[in-house]
Amino acid sequence: MKNRQAEVIDDVFEISASSTSDQRGQFRNFYRIGAEDTYLGGFKVRQINLSATNQSGTVRGMHLQIGKAAERKIVYCIRGEIFDVVVDLRPESRTFGHWFSRVLNPAIGIGLAIPPGCAHGYQTMVDDCEVLYLHDNDYDKSLESGVNALDEELCIDWPLSILNLSMRDRNLKSLANFRKEIGYEGKQHEL
């Protein structure tokens, strides 16, 4: 199976968290309204979520919200280290069905901005990880979607053996079924 990893996915980019430190410790600014407007188009935080994962090797994803709940999100790893993955599920995109990854941890100090229409997930590289999410839309359980992180067509190169994956995530659809569900008839782009 061909690896569908992309070097770049349009509208997915790194955001640096500015930080200062002194003898007391460190202060980090994750987001300031207006700072990234060129790229985020007036991103307004509607919700902030924190995900804590105990065991290394755990995979969460690949999730997205669809329809009126489609959202842009910013993701930071604030404790531990994760292998963060974005899958492009936008039918009009030249990278539809391809994935992009970055290792995120507090020392690196970067996060990923993820546009609507892209699924997100990650694998914990160490025990006791925390991931901070900033979302620009309200969560709607009826508009949850995603693709299976273990789908052979995606061929995501997870760095560790997968030790923990929820039943919900195991039951997410394949990329082929997602493609059928959205009526995607587009040409498969070669990058």
Image (cartoon, rainbow, N blue to C red):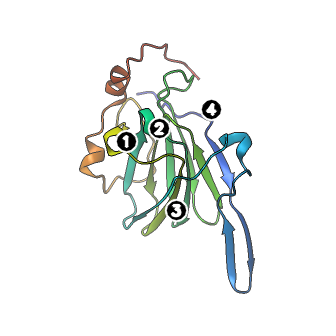
Relative image position of residue 170 (x, y in whole percent): 27, 44
Relative image position of residue 31 (x, y in whole percent): 66, 58
Q: Which mark is residue 70?
A: 2
Real-space Cα distance between discs 1 and 2?
Answer: 20 Å
Look at the picture and state if 93 lies above or below 164: above
| Of callouts 3 and 2, the N-terminal one | 2
Residue drawn at x 57%, y 53% is 45
Real-space Cα distance between discs 4 and 3?
Answer: 24 Å
The 10 Å Cα crowd at callout 3, few under 14, some 14 to 19, many 20 or more, is many
Question: Residue at label 4?
Answer: 10
The 10 Å Cα crowd at callout 1, few under 14, some 14 to 19, many 20 or more, is many
| Of callouts 1 and 4, the N-terminal one | 4
| Position of residue 161 in the picture relative to residue 43 (left or right) | left
| Of callouts 1 and 2, the N-terminal one | 2
| Of callouts 3 and 1, the N-terminal one | 3
Q: Looking at the rendering, which quadrant does residue 134 occupy?
A: bottom right
Q: Amino acid at mark 1?
A: Ala
Q: Nearer the viewer, mark 1 or mark 2?
A: 2
Look at the picture and state if 109 lies above or below 73: below
Question: Residue at label 3?
Answer: 81
